[in-house]
Each structure stands twice: as C-alpha cells, then as structure tokens.
Image: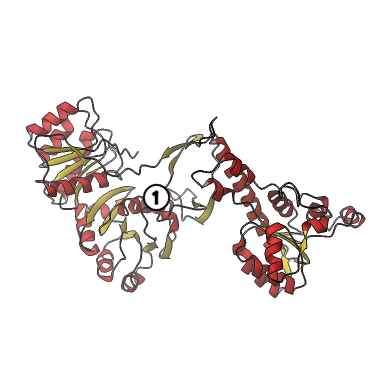
Amino acid sequence: MTTQHIPIQRALISVSDKTGVVEFAKFLAERKVKILSTGGTAKLLADNGIKVVEVGDYTGFPEMMDGRVKTLHPRVHGGILARRDLSHHTEAMKKHDIPAIDMVVVNLYPFAATIAKPDVKLEDAIENIDIGGPAMVRASAKNYPFVAIVTDCGDYRQLMDEMQKHGGALGHDTRFALAKKAFAHTAEYDGMISTYLSSLDEDHNRRLFPDQLHLTFTKAQDMRYGENPHQDAAFYVEKHPASGTLAHFHQLQGKELSYNNIADADAAWQCCRAFEVPACVIVKHANPCGVAVADNLLVAYQRALETDPTSAFGGIIAFNRELDGATAEAVAKQFVEVVLAPLFSVEARKVFAGKQNVRLLEIPLAPSVQDVDMKRVGGGLLVQSSDDFDIAQLKVVTKRKPTDEEMNDLIFAFRVAKFVKSNAIVFCRYGMTLGVGAGQMSRVDSTRIAAIKAQHAGLSLQGAVAASDAFFPFRDGLDVIAEAGATAVIQPGGSMRDDEVIAAADEHGMAMVMTGMRHFRH
C-alpha cells in the first residue's frame, strides 16, 4: 500500500457548515496554500484576514442565477479532475491555463435541516438541493490519488496534524479515506432528496412512507459473531439516532459484543426506559423474564430477579438510574452477560473491575422514540410507525372496579406486556412481575406458562393482576387467569366475544380494564 504524500498548494473552500473553517483556512494560508472560495465562505474568510480568490475572479465568469452557477466551470473541474501522471492531461492544463487544485473543502446545502421544518414548502426544499457541491465532491473523490476531498469539518484537526508532520502534504491512505467518506456523503445526500420527493403526494403533502426509501447506516463495530457462532455480524447505526436509544451506548468494559447481546440489550433498554421510577429489567432471549420498580435500584433488582432466577442466568440486565455500588455487588453475584445503565458509579465500576468479561454499557437516558420500526424479510423490508402508545384512556368494563393498588399494578403489567413477545400474558403485584408467558401460538398456553413460572419461583398469584397484550378471543384464557388467583386483568378489548369475556370476569368477581390498544410484538 502506497504512503505517497502530496503537498497541498491550492485549495478550494466552499462550505455550508462553517464550523472550524476559519481556523482550518488560516492553517492553510500560513503554509502558503492558495485559497479559492465562493460567496458567504469567501466573505467569512476575508473578514478574518485570510487572503482568498473569489471563484468568479478565478474563472473569469461571475456567479449568476442566485448562485446556482459558480463552480461549474472547466477551470475548476479541470483543476480537480486532471491526472498529474498523464502527459496529455498536464498538457491540456498548460494549454488552457488550468492550475491544479489539490484540496477541495466542501459540505453541501442544508437539505436535511430544510425538510425537517414542519411547514417546509417544496420550492424551499428544491432551492436547497446542491448541484455544484456534489459535482466537486464526486470529481475530487474520483481523483483521490491527487486531490484531497474534505466533507466533514470533524476531520480538520486530523488533517492539520498530518500536514504539520509531513511538511504540508497528505498521504495516499488519508486521501483514499477522505474519498470513501465523500462518496458516502453524496450517496446519503442524493438518497435523502429522493426519499423526500417520493414522499410527496399530488398536493405536495408529505406521506409517512415514501415510494423510494433510501437508508443510510454506518458500521459502528463488528460483532463477536452472529446469532450463532458460525455466522458473522456487524452493528450499524443511523447518522442521527433518536436520543436515548441503544445506538448511543458506550462500552466501559467487557468482552466483544455479539449479535444476540445487542438484540437482547435493546429489548432490555427499551422496556427499562419506559418507567419513570427506579426500575430493573432482566431479559433473556429478547423477552423480559423479570421486571420491577421500587424506591431504589437494589430492591428493584432483587424483585426482578425473584420473578425467574433460572431464566435470569446469563441474561441482560438494564437499570434506568445510575448503578450504585450496593446494587452492583448484588448483580455481580450472578452470571450476567451485559449490564446497561445511564451511569455507573465509581463504586459500581470497582465491583465489575474484577469481572472483566461482563459487558458494561452506559447509555444516556431519554424518552424519545424512533420514527419507524423496520424488519427484514425475504427480499424486502417491512416498515411501520413505532408503537409509542402509552396508556392514556382506561375503561373499566366489569361490575367490580379495581382498587387503586390494583390499578397501579395493572398499568405496570400492561406496560411490561408491551415488550413481551406475543402472545403475552404478564402477572404482577406490587410493581413486580410474578410470571411471564411469551411467544406462544395460544393465549391460553401463554397464560398457563406464566402461572407455572410463578409457581416454580415460589410466588403466589393470589391477589395478583394480569395483563394481556391483545384481546381474549374466548373466555378460556380469562378462566385460567382467575383460577391462578388473579383479581384484576387489563387487556385491549376489541373481540367479537368481549361481552362473553366480561361476563366471565364478573362471574369470577374480577375487575377488568380495557385500553383500546393492542401491543403485538412478533
């Protein structure tokens, strides 16, 4: 691999995002780099005492048409595209007085920021589609053996350091890395434009699902392995992931993460951050096997573990508060794969320092949700709006109303059920899961499994409440819940047999609350 360094003698700078550009341009000017620039960028540099040549003066052709035409000129693109190792290219440059341009610093019109405005008009979006910028970026990236293309202001410092070290030159590997980033930049930009335009209907109203969906993800890291050890895997993230989501994690210690670690960690974190009070969620194979809320994390953890200590072995544990030393001591006594929290105290870090295989993931806590959910299927992609519904309106449909204590537990249980694979039945009491039935083809079977889980853990269901993620198609599921000892149940409703199910609840003296909203999680 070549490491040839090429000195930077002439640079063209034209940026929309002007972060750090003055400092970078001053650095170049101090090293006798001739600077070309346009419009607002040229004015900014000149106002800061940096000698620049306007592109219009350079080409002999003024900017026109509200800036639509300025850099689209042979003297610009010839200087960028010319191969300096081909004699007929260099002869053409000499014949037409086209100096070489060694660096192009360009970032594009703020199309993303424009279309993010709720009242954006199509004509405003169109005017923020950059033409000359992408042309220069692509031309520079294509000719990376001779031209450095800089599209990210975050790269300025690294480039200055390298030029300082190598007498004002940049190496081949750096130019190639910049070119790869540049093509990714223009691909994302064009995809964004296509996605936006294809989302507009005949009246230019924006639809949630565009005709063309262009997605851009960047590889965050390679995984230890995929779902199984013989599979390879990697974790990719959005450019601007929603705040508080798993993509923002920082691994403090532990082994390399696997595909399943990430999937289970996401399930645990989504559930945990749904609670406002201190909470602990233990996940195994993408399902919560224990969830509890309490006044402090230690009690929440102890109660969550009590639900199903067998399944918790080798699980993923999430907390929605800073993990303290006492809770860390308790967690460290069991075999755990991953621990997630917004922060880890100094004491907690010390506890886990002796268990270096345990992966600690620190994630800033935020209540935001993703715009859409996606699922890969054979040859395609399923896209839907996110299930961000939380309990808003509750309707008591039985003769007996739930007590305040039951109602609190019902809300807690239904919130947990949202994160359990369908068909889901969750028994709870006092802000703690007692039994979780997940992923069965029959709701009755899920109910029985939840009851068996409670029995195996030595937990009584007498006086408990139960939540179902979807309606009861028949009364048999409710009968099993009542026989287990539950006194109240929460469910979406919406079955043709709702009256039959309500009558069954009345027969058992149970309270039933309907939410009007289903939470299938396949």
Count of residue discs: 1
Left or right: residue 426 compared with residue 264: left
Question: From the image, which quarter does the N terminus lie in?
Answer: bottom right
- Which x, y percent locates residue 409? 17, 48
- Which x, y percent locates residue 440? 27, 37
Q: Residue at x 28, y 71 (%)?
A: 325
What is the residue that sits farthest to the top in this orientation? 496
Q: Is residue 56 above or below residue 346?
A: above
Question: From the image, which quarter does the C terminus lie in?
Answer: top left
Crowd band around label 1 with a 10 angstrom C-alpha radius: few (<14), some (14–19), many (20+):
some
Q: Residue at x 15, y 50 (%)?
A: 429
- Which x, y percent locates residue 318? 32, 57
Q: Is residue 318 above or below residue 195?
A: below
The amino acid marked with disc number 1 is Ala
Quarter where residue 331 is shown: bottom left
Left or right: residue 261 compared with residue 127: left
Q: Along the line of sight, which residue is nearer the eye, 246 or 390? A: 390
Q: Residue at x 84, y 60 (%)?
A: 99
Q: Say if residue 464 shows up in the picture.
A: yes
Q: Along the line of sight, which residue is nearer the eye, 289 or 187? A: 187
- Which x, y percent locates residue 370? 42, 47
Asked which colour scheme the image uses, the reply is secondary structure
Q: Is residue 322 above or below residue 183?
A: below
Q: Say if residue 167 shows up in the picture.
A: no
Q: Along the line of sight, which residue is nearer the eye, 40 or 462? A: 40
Q: Which residue is mark 1?
A: 263
Name the secondary structure under disc 1. helix
